[in-house]
Image (cartoon, rainbow, N blue to C red):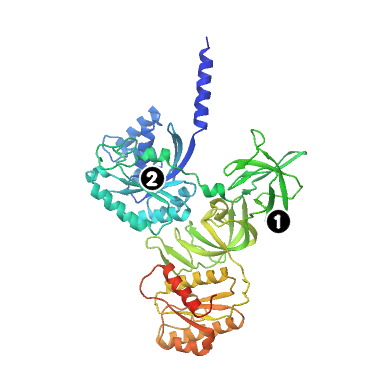
Amino acid sequence: MAHVSDLIATDIEQYLKQHEAKSLLRFITCGSVDDGKSTLIGRMLYDAKMLFEDQLAATLADSVKWGTQGAEIDFALLVDGLAAEREQGITIDVAYRYFSTDRRKFIVADTPGHEQYTRNMVTGASTADIAVVLVDARRGVLTQTRRHSFLVSLIGIRKVVLAINKMDLMGYSQQVFDAIVADYGEFAQHLNLDEITAIPLSALRGDNMLGRSEHTPWYDGPTLMGYLETVDVSDPRQSAAAFRLPVQWVNRPNLDFRGFSGTIASGAVKPGDRIRVQPSGRESSVARIVTAGGDLSRAVAGQSITLTLTDEIDISRGAVLSHCAAPADEADRFEATLVWMAEEALVPGRGYLLKIGTQTVPASVARPKHKVDVNTMEQLAASTLALNEIGVCEIALDRVIAFDPYAVNRDTGGFILIDRLSNGTVGAGMLHVALQAEPARAPWHRPRVLWLTGSADAGLQQAIAEQLEARLRGLGLASSRLIGDQLRLGLNRDLGDSDADRTESARRADEVARLLVDAGLSVIVALGADSPGGLAVARSVVPDDEFIEIPIDAVERALEQQMESVLALLRARGFLA
């Protein structure tokens, strides 16, 4: 007969093995203030039976002192632990909670709804697989709902649960639910989301949380927990992507072993593969894939490994190991989207530290090309970025690094900016493309002045100018641009807004453009508002065969549609092949 201790040990081993094999889902709750994010997580913990008796008793006591549910339990207090959070009834900092069901393990981040804590929300979303966007059924889709949804999309989360909460306060009305789903769906068309699943909920009452609610017979979709337990969060792009291993540590336990340790960011590797060390460019072959459990015949994205190579190569922390056939990009200047997270505004030109993967390099940020109004998606002129603002900037490093565009690989394309004095994180961002100081000139290219006219919307003209320059550079055409806002701060700072001053502004811009054309650059001019006689003066400076006027529609059209019209005009004029 087996001893009791042996049976207990066997049960524990089986329990640990069962939980070890479960998949892990990381998700966030986000949305506007008082939509019920903390209550939803507290209810999940309660329903998953992840609370000890003393925790439950303490929460019941706190509910009487701090809560808003009278004598009933206030589930939000299970998450909102700071005294300031309990006093004000709001979430301030990101709260991470772990819980498990029979089918899956979960790490959930409860993020603040207030606009002033947007940086906290971005932090919580940076490691999430999916987002649960809560909407109060009484108030519908709000500004902060749109803000958080845009940030979720920006960070790279592609699956969203639209959790329409507090349905009990609206009589579980299907019409209310359908109207909110339609409103959100119209807004989400402008976001880069793959899947939106709408669920009617009452987090406080438990409707459609763990089991299907009898109050919503008209709803035939999944429950929230049912969805979270079954949703597929594997990213086929990560496994199919090229191999990347940022070196975290040079593993040298003795004189006979030298390996390079890190977590595979994407792709797969096996012994015999040809490897390039970036950015040094040295090459070798994989000899072994070493782990604590023994050598592997193949390793894939997400695994922590140590590689040994067939050749002795100088490799240090921060290097990136890639397949020779598909190496990462290399550059020291980038265009990037930057989320500013510090109380002190961005200072263009000041030195910061940029941390990407396992390396940290000195960096400087140029004046933003534009910032984004996350409520309207409008691109606005900007000279700096303040707390919680998002903009597109050029970033210069003091040395070349290996990277992938963020849209391709979040691990090798995402970065943070660090203040060199305080060592605090001041920004987080996503690298898009490498910038070259002097792009090669195509042999068939004849430089021209490309003058944008017809719209007083300076932001639209600037956005088109930036996209057009990027398109021309991508085609190997040497190009530059003159933006009205930038000229007004420098060359034209002595001019006002009168018709005569705007005409003089146009003349000066075209004089500069003519010099740049003579130097072999095509120049995109975007001055904003047209001026009487300004265009005529500009055309008198540059010969007709070197001047192309590009009228921009005053009516609102998608930027992509505007760009197609611009490119069609340039093809018709023989500027583009």
Q: Amino acid at mark 1?
A: Gly
Q: Position of residue 418 (x, y in %)?
A: 56, 55
Q: Residue at x 37, y 42 (%)?
A: 38
Q: Position of residue 162 (x, y in %)?
A: 35, 48
Numbered label attached to residue 299: none
Q: Quadrant of the C terminus?
A: bottom right
- Is residue 382 or residue 331 the one in the foreground? 331
Q: Marks 1/2: CA distance?
A: 52 Å
Which marked residue is nearer to the observer: mark 1 or mark 2?
1
Secondary element type, mark 1: loop
Q: Is residue 497 left or right of residue 23?
A: left
Is residue 327 visible in the rendered image? The answer is yes
Q: Position of residue 416 (x, y in %)?
A: 54, 54
Q: Amino acid at mark 2?
A: Ala
Q: Is residue 231 left or right of residue 318?
A: left
Q: Residue at x 43, y 84 (%)?
A: 502
Secondary element type, mark 2: helix
**To which residue does mark 2 refer?**
84
Q: Residue at x 50, y 29 (%)?
A: 18
Q: Is residue 128 left or right of residue 296?
A: left
**To which residue does mark 1 refer?**
281
